[in-house]
Image (spheres, helix red, strand yellow):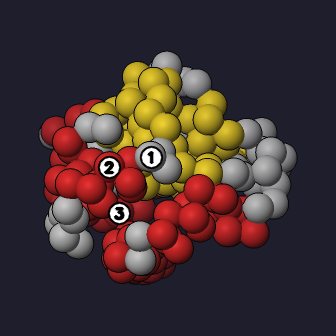
Amino acid sequence: MPAVFRSHLEKFIEIEDEEYSMISSYFTQVSVRKKENLIEEGQICRSHFFILNGCLRKFFINEKGVEQTTEFAIENWWITDNIAYERQQPTEFFIQAVEPSEILVINHASQEALLRNVPKMERYFRFVYQRAYAASQMRIKYLYDYSREDLYYHFHDHYPEFVQRIPQYLLASFLGFTPEYLSEIRGKRRS
């Protein structure tokens, strides 16, 4: 199991070598190709994904047939459809690789067993979920509080790694813009 995952865990909990070996046994490491779907709308959401390297996104297709990106995940981030995963029900989302990625996958049954057998992982996942909830809460605030232009500038200034790394049409989708509108905003800033 990659050392990067252990380093990430140790930001939140202390782990002995034997514990890490046990924790690792619940995960599978997988390589995914760019644009490969890990899960598609209508499938039972059985997995939770940790990104070792690369980038994934979660999106749905709206009533007009347009992809709407709701979340990105890069190195040391988790991604799944939390509601469908916890309830083991069909998802309304797709999770797709934005670039070639290496990920760790844990299924619901394995995660439940991990939490029973390594209780400190409850604390770890509590931190993970708290941070994810806080990020979601702030994203909702920004969507209501900022003008569309200010939303882009805020994102650009606070998450420059995404602006450089994510294709512009996906960034536009995440921000709720058309790619043309994003180009217009970017053009104004350069002027």
Disc number placed over residue 21 in the picture, else none: 2
The amino acid sitting under disc 1 is: Ser
Tag nearer the camera, 1 or 3 = 1
Tag nearer the camera, 3 or 2 = 2
The amino acid sitting under disc 3 is: Leu
> Which residue in the protein does label 1 denote?
25
Q: Which residue is found at the position 59% from the left and 56% from the top? A: 110
**Disc 1 to disc 3: CB gap under 8 Å:** no
Residue placed most toward the observer, 24 or 31:
24
Residue 101, x across and y down, in percent: 40, 28
- Relative to 42, is 118 on the left or the right? left
* Image quarter hosting the N terminus: top left
- Tag 1's secondary structure? loop
164 in relation to 57, above or below: above
Residue placed most toward the observer, 169 or 165:
165
Crowding at dot 3, Cα within 10 Å, few <14 / some 14-19 / many 20+, comes out as some
Residue placed most toward the observer, 15 or 88:
15
Work out whether residue 178 can be spotted.
Answer: yes
Q: Earlier in the sequence, mark 3 or mark 2?
A: 2
Per the model, the C-alpha gap separating discs 1 and 3 is 42 Å
Disc number placed over residue 151 in the picture, else none: 3
- Could you say which quadrant of the image residue 166 lies in? top left
- Could you say which quadrant of the image residue 81 lies in? bottom right
Work out whether residue 125 can be spotted.
Answer: no
